Image (cartoon, grey):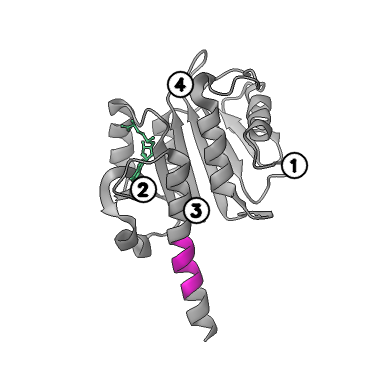
Amino acid sequence: MRAFLIVGNRALTMPFNLNNLTAGRMDVLCRCIAQSLFISHGIRRDVEVYLLLLGEPEPPKAIRVVGSEVKNMAPDERNIAGLLRKALMLGADEWKRSSPGIYIGRKNIKDLLVELSEKYEVVYLREDGENIRDAVKELNNPLFVLGDHLGLSREIERVVLDCAMKIISVSPLSLQADQCIVIVHYELDRIDFRSMLNEAV
Ligand code: SAM
């Protein structure tokens, strides 16, 4: 399994206007979901995506998207935003399903990472981390934590660093969050497919 957690510093915590996805930078989160889950003509069933929504009016909220369960999702931002909007119509403390594969809950960063640490190795993606190509072979069920356009606040970063096994960099450049996700998939796919080929020989 692979998972991604994207921190939306201003991401809206109420149903939002689908004609203005830059409000709270919901567009960034939708692109991250698309790049985490979609391949050409298919969905990565072994991927989960988590969003931490920290914007007004009711932060924090978390959304969970399960690749093996999602139905009727298309890779375009507006379609994904519609599903997030539907989730935000539900009030829920614990995970509650709003549509196939999409859940919402009231979680802060600590609750979320404590819960996810039981299932995943937490990896923080940051520009100054270890080169992904050196680090990737040692990863087991990784959960990659990324910031949105604003990165991570110092307070959130402290919690992430408490839980993280590694800090990994995907490029010498500072990239957009969804670009980082594409590179992570590429590096993990190279390893997975190479070992599948070796096993077949
Ligand atoms: N101005 C923001 C900052 O200073 O943190 C830029 C954030 S960047 C657009 C979004 C996120 O992508 C970052 O918080 C980080 O998690 C990840 N990121 C960007 N470039 C990266 C790189 N080269 N290696 C690893 N992660 C990176």
Q: Give the crowd class for mark 1: few <14, some 14-19, many >=20 residues within 10 Å.
A: few
**Residue nearer the viewer, 52 or 95:** 52
Query: Which callout, 1 or 4, points at the residue further toward the start of the chain?
Result: 4
Task: Say which mark, if any, is on residue 72.
Answer: 1
Residue 104 seen in the figure: yes
From the top left corner, tell me how far across and down residue 83 is, in percent: 67, 31
Task: Say which mark, if any, is on residue 10.
Answer: 4
From the top left corner, tell me how far across and down residue 48 is, in percent: 55, 46
**Distance Cα–Cα, label 3 vs label 2:** 11 Å
Helix, strand or loop for disc 2: strand
Question: What's drawn in magenta, residue-wise?
Answer: 188-194
Dot 2 amino acid type: Val
What residue is shown with label 3?
Answer: 2
**Distance Cα–Cα, label 3 vs label 1:** 21 Å
Q: Are marks 1 and 4 in contact (CB under 8 Å)?
A: no
Query: Which callout, 3 or 2, points at the residue further toward the start of the chain?
Result: 3
**Mark 1 C-beta to ligand 1 under 8 Å:** no
In the current view of this chain or complex, which residue is farthest to the top?
57
User: Does the magenta stretch mainly form a helix, a strand or a loop?
Assistant: helix
In the displayed structure, does residue 21 sit left or right of residue 3? right
Task: Say which mark, if any, is on residue 169.
Answer: none
Dot 3 amino acid type: Arg
Dot 1 amino acid type: Asn
What residue is shown with label 2?
Answer: 123
**Distance Cα–Cα, label 1 vs label 4:** 27 Å
Write the residue at 31% across / 42% down.
Answer: 126
